[in-house]
Amino acid sequence: MILLVGATAQEIEWLRSRAGVETLICGIGPVDAASRVSCALSTNRYDVVVNAGIAGAFAGAVNVGDGVVVGEELFQLDREDGEALALPPGNLVADRVPADAHLIEAVTALGFPLVRGITVSRVTTSDATVARLRERGAEIESMEGFAVIRAAQLAGVPAIELRGISNIVGDRSKSNWDFAAGITGLRKILNATLDLLHTIPTYAD
């Protein structure tokens, strides 16, 4: 069984009903996403989690309208000056999480770009923040990716994140925000991925 997670109904309502796919609308932002996905994974058995939605891309990474697969998600858990948190010995900060390597390999083999994402709790609109996030290696920005993939990781369920690019991160007056283009990109990669998963016996039921 596949758990398909979207932040809003509008991002995945176009998808036709598929056998073996259960949809969860997790809400906007990392707190709601982590809470609702964790609850779903604790009460039902799933073979894979697919996080699907639109996202912004940093200039030069990919284009508006592209469908991309996220290989690793970053999360901001640090000091304002960029330094690491001071923690008691033996404590580590979980601020990055990989998607399932086998799923990444399978989806990128279909020709879709592989990118690194960063999860934020507010939309980036300033050049200073763009520069800071780019320094961490971020190529796209979302508000739920890390939360969904981390919840699946802690539950021991393979997970992958798919995004359609709707805008360029930064000044909203220059970002060319295009929801429809983001959905077009998402439609391509999500349909292709679900078709692929249904050819793999582990996920086909």
Image (cartoon, rainbow, N blue to C red):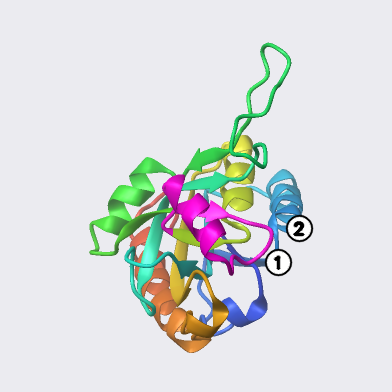
Mark 1, residues whose alpha carbon is within 10 Å: few (<14), some, or many (≥20)? some
**Image coordinates for residue 165, horizontal then vertical, percent:** 44, 73
The image quarter in which residue 194 lies: bottom left
Characterize the local packing of mark 2: few (<14), some (14-19) or many (20 or more) Cα atoms within 10 angstroms: some
Q: Position of residue 87 (x, y in %)?
A: 71, 20
The question of residue 195 being in magenta is answered with no
Distance between the Cα atoms at labels 1 and 2?
Answer: 7 Å
Q: Is residue 190 above or below residue 153?
A: below
Tell me residue 143's x, y (percent).
62, 61
- The residue lying at 76 percent from left, 58 percent from top is 32
- At a point 68% along the width and 47% down the height, the residue shown is 41
Reply above or below: 55 against 14: above
Residue 155 vs 128, above or below: the answer is above
Question: Percent from the top left, x then y, of residue 187?
Answer: 42, 78
The amino acid at mark 1 is Ile
Residue at the spot 62% in from the left edge and 82% down from the top edge: 10
Residue matched to label 2: 32
Locate residue 85: give its quadrant.
top right
**Secondary structure under badge 2?**
helix
Residue carrying label 1:
28
The answer to which of 27 and 155 lies nearer the viewer is 27
Provide the residue span drawn in magenta.
Answer: 117-139
Q: Is label 1 in contact with label 2 (beta carbons under 8 Å)?
A: yes
Mark 1, secondary structure of its residue: loop
Q: Tell me if I can see residue 122 in this picture.
A: yes
Left or right, residue 183 beside residue 197 = right
Q: Is residue 205 visible?
A: no
Q: Would you say residue 137 sits in the magenta stretch?
A: yes
Q: Of residues 125 and 112, which is closer to you in this image?
A: 125
As shown in the figure, which amino acid type bears the numbered disc 2?
A: Asp
As drawn, is 194 to the left or to the right of 13?
left
